[in-house]
Image (cartoon, coloured by chain):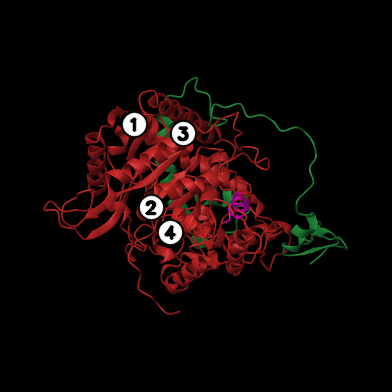
Chain colours: A red, B green
Amino acid sequence: MDPCSLTAVQIARAVKARELTAVAVWEAFEARIRRFNPTLNAFLHVNPRAAAEAAAVDARLAAGEDPGPLAGVPVAVKDNIVTCGMPTTCASRILEGWVSPYDATVVKNLRAAGAVLAGKTNLDEFAMGGSNENSAFGPVRNPWDLRVVPGGSSGGSAASVAARLVPLALGSDTGGSVRQPASFCHLHGLKPTYGRVSRFGLVAFASSLDQIGPLARTADDAALLFGVLAGHDPHDATSLRPEELALAPAPAGPLRVGVVREFFAEGLDPRVRGVIEAALAKWKAAGATLVDVSLPSARYGIAIYYLLATSEASSNLSRYDGVRYAFRAADARNLEDLYSRTRGQGFGPEVKRRILLGTYALSAGYYDAYYRKAQQVRTLIRREVSAAFETCDVLAGPTVPTPPFGLGALIGDPLSMYLSDMYAVVANLAGVPALSVPAGFTQANGMAADGMTADGAAAIPTLPVGLQVMARPGHEATLFAFARGQEALFPELGGRVAPDPEEVSR
Amino acid sequence: MKMIERETVLKIARLARLELSSEEIEAMQGQLGRILSYVEMIQGVDTEGVEPTAHVLDVDMTLRPDVPVEAEVPPSTYLKTAPDSGYGFFKVPRIVEGGEHGSV
């Protein structure tokens, strides 16, 4: 049995049943990482202690102990989540060589659940970007087509799961950074309810929006990892206690699916529209109730996101000053010079752009017009989302307005890149959970969502398309119920895996 | 395409303690100008009497009990990951001009 073709659920079951050793599982995945990472550039660092961690899981089983729900399952960690014993770079020169003295809470949770930490994955610098091209350590390639981006900012995590270098990975999602790469790589990617997963040890980008979430190839795998991540953490004051907001069960009976009118308006690529409309039609045929809903203020989502996220980032990133972390510019004349030169040399262009934009939005004379106004419009979006859930269980639409785009296609056009998250940001702004599920592939010949041509022959898959569902705060279980329903409606999509990429020597 | 003034870029770069090359300043004038033109769309939204969002969820966040806890990692560990430290402190270049002492 090749462990790399198994799901996380199957691996944990086989390891616990002692049909597979955790060491054998890790060796199989490590071999794939060594073969294919030079092409994909998904991993920045492979955990040198992973084999020892796997051996410890096997030893616990031999001693009759239960290692936990992720027994022997390799999990990759986005490199903006801190880990003892491995570098945390945020794909930035400014943190190159820095090693955290502590583990993020989610990493502690992984270890306690019996997972094997596979390593740290590439990302857009400080999680700022939608293509993984803003990494100081080079772009990631999409295993479905090496000419296109894997999405971002969790591009390394998504590419590594899609290429079966790991069964599971952690991403972080501030404005779509888990869901957009999930859509581009044919994966399940969840942004949990704001506060459901601890951010202690997640390098802060925009604190009113950030959440850590799972990337997986199946709904059950995503739910399994979410279960390990979720929970209150005294180290994160924004993390939810069960009495503040409990995890709600999925509704009994057929789902009421709200179709967000504004997510099918101007700006939606017809190839994506075809896949999503076909998927929703199949849901309707299977007995789901489709409800027409409107979120009129969603059209302001990107505008307010880029005011709020950059404002928060300009504050959060002020700590990188050449005093406390790894990198310091060599030629400073005085302290202020040390700050400016360290930051000028250490940050890449997108991070600089966002720090400047946020500083502008918060500066004297502009605060009311930009920051305060954006928070007021955010209140309108929250109200509209809340009202929409009075008539439905989930709000559905495309995750991203376009299929994955070519490497280099948007790098000179930041605003167009930002628009890639026009549907995704709504969930972050409203604090609600949202999941991207595989919906199909764009087709060279026709646009059937199930990847079959009209005469039933298998078409050549071109590029993945994801469908996003949002739910009420606390209702992640409803999203997973939708994802399982989607898998049942489109069984052929679940069996489809990215081809092994061409190997390059380095 | 709307540009923002070179002086404006320099002013916010100084506020953000961010050294920029002249090529970067020029690029930012156009890029920030284009993004700011886009976000202008929110100025037309009627937000009369609308409270700005302070917390995204309608939950009452409870405060933890005000009791001290032990740090899991001793402060000295953080000094080891800094570019320069000594005597239990972070070391930085001279802050007061003309003084006799000061590191670097």
Which of the two discs, 2 and 3, labels the residue nearer the N terminus?
2
Q: Left or right: A432 with respect to A337?
A: left
The residue indicated by pointer 2 is A187
Mark 3, other Cα within 10 Å: few <14 / some 14–19 / many ≥20? many
Magenta region, main secondary structure: helix
Q: Left or right: A93 with respect to A456?
A: right
- Judged from the image, the secondary structure of the residue bearing numbered disc 2 is loop
Q: Residue at x 36, y 43 (%)?
A: A484
Amino acid at pointer 1: Leu
Which of the two discs, 4 and 3, labels the residue nearer the N terminus?
4
- Reply above or below: B104 against A279: below
Circle 1/circle 2 CB separation < 8 Å: no
Q: Quadrant of residue A404?
A: bottom left
- Report the magenta residues as a range: A106-114
Is residue A461 visible in the rendered image? The answer is yes
Residue A121 x %, y %: 51, 61
Amino acid at pointer 4: Val
| Chain letter, disc 3 residue | A
The residue indicated by pointer 3 is A475
The residue indicated by pointer 1 is A255
Circle 2/circle 4 CB separation < 8 Å: yes
- Judged from the image, the secondary structure of the residue bearing numbered disc 1 is loop
Rendered-image quadrant of the C terminus of chain B:
bottom right
| Chain letter, disc 4 residue | A
- Foreground residue, A393 or A116? A116
Labels 2 and 3 positioned on one and the same chain: yes
- Judged from the image, the secondary structure of the residue bearing numbered disc 3 is loop
The residue indicated by pointer 4 is A161
| Residue placed furthest toward the top | B49
| Chain letter, disc 2 residue | A
Mark 2, other Cα within 10 Å: few <14 / some 14–19 / many ≥20? many
Tell me the tag on residue A195. Answer: none
